[in-house]
Image (cartoon, rainbow, N blue to C red):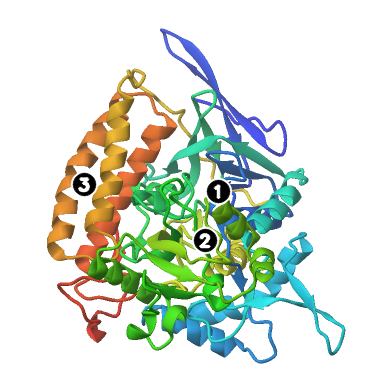
Amino acid sequence: MGFWQAVSPVFTCCWFIKTEELTFFFSIKTYDFIVIGSGISGLSFALRAAKFGTVAVVTKQEAMTTNTAWAQGGICCVKAKNDSFAEHTADTLGAGAGLCDEEVVSTIVSEGPEAIQELIDWGVKFDSSVDPETGEETLDLGREGGHSKRRILHAKDTTGREIETKLLAEARENDQIEFLEFHFAIDLITTKKLGYASPPRCVGVYALNVKTEKVVTLRSDRVILCTGGSGRVYLYTTNPDVATGDGVAMAWRAGVDIANMEFVQFHPTCLYHHEVKSFLITEAMRGEGAELIDKDGRQFMKEYDERGSLAPRDIVARAIDQEIKKTGGPCVFLDITHQSKEYIADRFPNIYETCLDLGIDISKEPIPVVPAAHYQCGGVATDVNGITSMQGLWAVGEVACTGLHGANRLASNSLLEGAVVSARALEACVKTFPAGDEVELIELPEWESGAVSDVDELVVIYHNWDEIRRLMWDYVSIVRTTKRLQRAATRLHNLQNEVQEFYWNFRVTADLLELRNLVELATLIVDSAARRKESRGAHFTLDYPNSESNLRENTVISKF
């Protein structure tokens, strides 16, 4: 019915389909690797994979728009002489509240230095200082909550931007890497969906060209999800607008196992200001001595944990939430006025200038802060090599659940995971489908829009988007109850039906696709939270306030 014609290393599969009524033509772009997402996980994978073949980097906005670029604090790695892999591992296990995979933690921590060196080789510059005794230049290491030692490499308070900028520049110079910016990945193409009887395998992806509003078909036997998290499923978040859980939603629809979605980490310190809703105040500030206080200047964190303001994020976020409810105030405050203005402006220039523009001089007055949704600790279930439950599909970074973070992520472990696991995932990819090996050719059908019309009631999409985010904030945020989860599940079920009807009756747009993914993500979070009859890490429920040893296991959800 069709034939394959290789025209270049990135080749086009040309199909001619004939019927009595019409003849038409379409093309399929084929790559050795398809990477969906352009943060640290996606770009570091693409740079390594380019040595083995052609790489498409698919990203729904411009490549720079990622969670990675928004990261402030840094990336952690054992570098100091008084630190060790064992101590970093122990800190990670402690923060993870008994649900980390110790072998995975040990592997990622021990391979951290090599991954950091690779980032440096790609041009990333971390802050350094000169040792007054030896005259040698050494990396300047910060400290954050849950860490027993200084091990956070940083570039002022815009570490993520430094990493993203340098990796992106390196990738754009590589002839083997093609950026498909403003291409929104709609769904994974699998052999099961195509009707093959063989075990399910991922063979490509459909993507919407946002600018032309045309859907393109991308073919590969190696598809890597690096789509980041899902903070936008909540009303208040530190995440950029692109964080709508696209990778997890696509994987779930394709029948891939999903794990631990109940563990949504809320960052304790998001700036509280009516003009700026998503500005993070890095945890590194607390590592440099900043203290959480109430409106009267009382340092309250020691009442909740002996580590005070440097306790793990789940503990600090719940403490702030309780203080706000107890006092009736809209926020608490973070005070770093003990440090000099010169030090603050040099160490945290982005935060200092942003706050100053809003009329807050943080060298003289405390910063108003509240918790906000920050990090998805669960995701597509993988091993430490990014291998999912479906052949041909890998997942790396925040979209994945490797076992590193457990029930609550240790600060600055996320960028480390992306750098380390992307290297391991490439090795697994090449081992599964070695370069040059012929893989069974799968005939991919063109995307069919059907008899659909353009969306004429955008207000419905925006209303549903807002409703999902509000109900998740009200019913499924820092503190949960069984009744709240049931209410959320009931409403989400109705919203799913509404969104599905919209999806099938109208031409796809970026807004509609994000709404579709958000309702999937919200449902997965609620379903996972309802299954865990205990409190652990980032999941806290008033109905089951204690952790139970017999429930110390992952929440894995399978669609099929």
Structural distance between the alpha carbons of marks 1 and 2: 10 Å
> Which of labels 3 and 1 is toward the front?
3
Find numbered disc 3 in the image and state the secondary structure of the residue it sits on.
Answer: helix
Find numbered disc 1 in the image and state the secondary structure of the residue it sits on.
Answer: loop
* Other-residue count near label 2 (Cα within 10 Å), few / some / many at <14 / 14–19 / ≥20: many
Q: Which of 52 and 451 is in front in this view?
A: 451
Tell me which label, 2 or 3, sits earlier in the chain: 2
Where is residue 59, by image quadrant?
Answer: top right
Residue 40 visible from this viewpoint = no
Tell me which label, 3 or 1, sits earlier in the chain: 1
Question: As shown in the figure, which amino acid type bears the numbered disc 3?
Answer: Leu
Label annotation for residue 76: none
Tell me which label, 1 or 2, sits earlier in the chain: 1
Structural distance between the alpha carbons of marks 3 and 1: 27 Å
> Which of labels 2 and 3 is toward the front?
3
Q: Nearer the viewer, residue 365 or 525?
A: 365
Question: As shown in the figure, which amino acid type bears the numbered disc 1?
Answer: Gly
Label annotation for residue 397: 2
Residue behind mark 3: 492
Residue behind mark 1: 37
